[in-house]
């Protein structure tokens, strides 16, 4: 009987150890009065809203792609101790979905979007005799659409107010200023749409921008620096550009020879549109304004 009792106690202990204890009490986790973010875009939004009221830390190294980054256990533990964790969501930071993070203190800013997420074609690969196939993946770069960024900022503000209620008035005031700036940038892009500017963008990462402003998308899997010289024949020749100006967005500087060829042969301007995925410490609205400046300058 004594042996049976000891066995029951041991099994209960194992069950408790296996439970998700990331929502343990603050004393157990030594929660720190800090906000920790997972990628540069939401970090920039969070810092604008938090101001100097609470410290904000981005733990993803600048050298890492936040979409592919896998933090080590020590870094995950740092996130667990934060009073608030802010992630982009939409599956952008894959590790967030499986890491033992305290869900009650985690904000996935993309949850604030009212429109559906976009799925795009992922990498083609093979699983043995089944042959090659392609999975659809969720497009994570929701922040590239200024109205999406406003929705994310609102979700972040709500999370900050819950975690630090003593500063909620300041958070709300900062959100108002940020939302006004983003709405102004949205209106600049709307004017380009209304003027009939023919703008084309790769579906990855620009799907949300293209959906918002009615731009044509292309399925270009290569990075801009690897685009072929005959890029126009890879789908752009079928585009309905009408007689308006033409611009093709790229998220990295392309091969100058490709840019010159497109401009000289088809009057298509390649326009660098920075996504901010690794631009830590940069102003979100200044980055977006710079993107729009380059686009406007390419369209006479």
Image (spheres, helix red, strand yellow):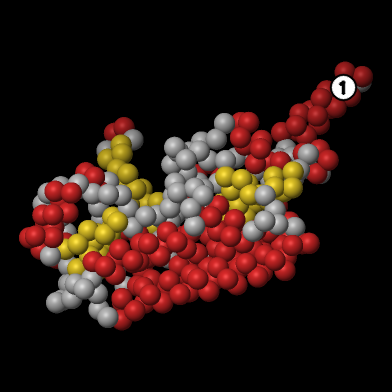
Figure label count: 1
- Residue 289, by quadrant, is bottom left
Q: Residue furthest top?
A: 3
Give the labeled residue for mark 1.
Answer: 6
Identity of the residue drawn at 13% across and 60% down: 263
Residue 88, image x, y percentages: 53, 54
Which residue occupies the foreground of this view, 209 or 98? 209
Residue drawn at 48 percent across, 74 percent down: 183
Quadrant in which the C terminus appears: bottom left
Q: Position of residue 203 (x, y in %)?
A: 31, 58
Q: Is residue 152 placed above or below 300 in the rendered structure?
A: above
Instruction: Give the farthest residue toward the left.
Output: 265
Q: Percent from the top left, x then y, of residue 87? A: 56, 51
Q: Residues within 10 Å of mark 1 (few under 14, many from 20)?
A: few
Q: Is residue 197 left or right of residue 86?
A: left
Rendering coords of residue 24 (x, y %): 78, 42
Residue at position x 45%, y 38% in the image: 64
Q: Is residue 39 left or right of residue 82?
A: left
Residue 183 sits above or below residue 157 on the image: below
Instruction: Name the side, left or right, on which 25 lies relative to 125.
Output: right
Residue 222 visible here: no
Relative height, residue 52 to residue 241 (above, below): above
Q: Is residue 288 visible?
A: yes
> 114 or 11, which is in the foreground?
114
**Of all residues shown, which one is farthest toward the right?**
2
Is residue 7 found left or right of 266 in the rendered image?
right
What element does badge 1 sit on?
helix
Q: Quadrant of residue 21?
A: top right
Q: Quadrant of residue 19?
A: top right
Q: Is residue 23 above or below residue 204?
A: above
Residue at the spot x=37%, y=52% of the render? 136
- Image quarter of the N terminus: top right
């Amino acid at each position: 009987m004594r042996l049976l009792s000891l066995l029951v106690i041991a099994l209960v202990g194992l069950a408790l150890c296996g439970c998700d204890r990331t929502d343990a009490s603050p004393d157990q986790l030594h929660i720190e009065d800090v906000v920790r973010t997972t990628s540069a875009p939401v970090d920039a939004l969070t810092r604008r809203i938090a101001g100097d009221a609470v410290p904000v830390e981005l733990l993803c190294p600048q050298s890492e792609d936040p979409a592919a980054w896998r933090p080590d256990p020590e870094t995950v533990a740092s996130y667990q101790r934060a009073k608030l964790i802010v992630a982009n969501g939409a599956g952008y930071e894959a590790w967030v979905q499986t890491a033992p993070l305290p869900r009650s203190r985690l904000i996935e800013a993309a949850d604030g979007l009212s429109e559906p997420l976009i799925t795009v074609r992922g990498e083609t690969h093979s699983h043995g005799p089944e042959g090659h196939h392609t999975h659809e993946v969720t497009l994570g770069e929701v922040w590239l659409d200024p109205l999406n960024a406003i929705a994310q900022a609102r979700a972040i503000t709500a999370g900050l107010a819950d975690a630090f209620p003593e500063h909620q008035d300041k958070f709300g005031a900062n959100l108002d200023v940020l939302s006004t700036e983003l709405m102004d940038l949205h209106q600049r892009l709307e004017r380009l749409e209304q003027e009939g500017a023919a703008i084309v963008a790769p579906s990855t990462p620009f799907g949300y921008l293209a959906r918002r402003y009615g731009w044509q998308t292309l399925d270009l899997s290569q990075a801009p620096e690897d685009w072929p010289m005959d890029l126009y024949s890879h789908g752009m020749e079928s585009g309905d550009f009408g007689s308006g100006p033409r611009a093709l967005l790229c998220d990295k500087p392309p091969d100058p020879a490709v840019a010159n060829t497109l401009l000289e042969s088809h009057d298509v301007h390649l326009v660098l549109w920075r996504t901010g995925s690794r631009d830590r410490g940069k102003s979100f609205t200044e980055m977006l304004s710079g993107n729009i400046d380059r686009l406007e300058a390419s369209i006479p």
